[in-house]
């Protein structure tokens, strides 16, 4: 059995929400099952979940195509964050776990005193056996909402907690040499050991309507992870059910490893 590790799993808006019906309960259920399996092996789990803005739009019956200013989006996330946490709370309960909402910002991580508070909160959440569900505190900052930066936020959380692994669940399902949504000849790159100009050149902008992060922010997150020896896996929603077998060498999870 693998030694006990700290694993951060980040799930993006387009994986966790359905543009018409709101929360994708089936996906959260698969995630909760995988988390419970990894917890049973003694690992420590952290979830970083986007989706608040999209769920706020769904809850209020608004149109995803309508764009507003940052304060408008912040108001929407305040609504959607409630739906998001309700879904995690109810589904994880079924697997015997309580969840804790942790809302943080880059500025909070930059500031020594706040950074210590964040760390202390995580340490005690772990002691309580609770699963932290992290999102950006969108009310107090405009940066994350504007640039879709839950990706680098999760990389910084992984570094802060000295996690061994960060897993991104994205609609792209991995890092490709071309945009797989636009070009069916796109090939999956299974391993990246050096983030050079070629890798940067492959990372385009986000191509989904509801998610804010794209491959560019994933590569940026990978750079933060590689500097601190955190292994990053970019994978897709279809692979969630295999995550519980992450340490089983017979199980192949489709995606891209950066290390
Ligand atoms: N915090 C935003 C939300 O929950 C998402 C930010 C991101 O996707 O990076 O909607």
Image: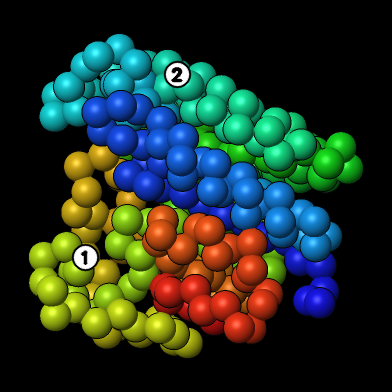
Residue 258 x, y percent position in the rendering: 49, 78
Disc on res. 78 = 2
Label 1 vs label 2: CA separation?
29 Å
Q: Residue furthest top?
A: 60
User: Can see residue 103?
Assistant: no
Front-lying residue, 110 or 49: 49
The answer to whether one can see residue 209 in this image is yes
Which residue is rendered at x = 53% and y = 70% of the image?
232
**135 left or right, relative to 228:** left
Name the one closer to the observer, 215 or 41: 41
- Percent of width and height locating residue 185: 14, 80
Please, is residue 27 above or below residue 187 in the view? above
- Say which residue appears at 33% left-offset and 51% top-offset: 213
Residue 214 location in percent, x, y? 29, 56
Residue visible at 86% across and 37% down?
A: 128
| Picture disc at residue 204 | 1
- Residues 203 and 178: in front is 178
Residue at x-position 19% and y-position 78%: 186
Label 1 SS: loop
Picture mark count: 2
Looking at the image, residue 192 lies above or below residue 227: below
Left or right placement of residue 156 versus residue 188 in this view: right
């Amino acid at each position: 059995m693998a030694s006990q590790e700290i694993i951060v799993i980040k799930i993006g808006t387009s994986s966790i929400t359905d543009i018409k019906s709101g929360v994708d309960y089936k996906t959260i259920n698969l995630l909760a099952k995988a988390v419970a399996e990894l917890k049973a092996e003694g690992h420590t789990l952290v979830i970083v979940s986007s989706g608040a803005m999209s769920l706020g739009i769904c809850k209020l019956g608004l149109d995803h195509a309508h764009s507003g200013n940052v304060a408008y989006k912040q108001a929407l996330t305040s609504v959607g964050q409630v739906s998001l946490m309700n879904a995690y709370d109810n589904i994880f309960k079924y697997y015997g776990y309580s969840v804790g909402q942790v809302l943080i910002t880059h500025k909070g991580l930059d500031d020594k005193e706040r950074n210590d508070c964040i760390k202390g909160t995580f340490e005690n959440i772990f002691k309580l056996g609770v699963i932290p569900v992290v999102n950006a505190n969108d009310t107090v900052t405009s940066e994350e909402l504007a640039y879709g930066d839950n990706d680098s936020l999760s990389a910084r959380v992984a570094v802060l907690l000295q996690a061994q692994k960060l897993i991104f669940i994205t609609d792209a399902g991995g890092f490709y040499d071309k945009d797989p949504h636009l070009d069916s000849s796109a090939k999956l790159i299974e391993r990246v050991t050096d983030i050079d100009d070629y890798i940067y050149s492959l990372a385009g902008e986000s191509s989904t309507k509801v998610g804010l992060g794209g491959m560019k922010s994933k590569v940026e997150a990978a750079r933060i992870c590689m500097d601190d020896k955190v292994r990053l896996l970019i994978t897709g929603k279809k692979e969630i059910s295999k995550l519980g077998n992450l340490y089983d060498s017979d199980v192949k999870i489709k995606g891209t490893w950066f290390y």
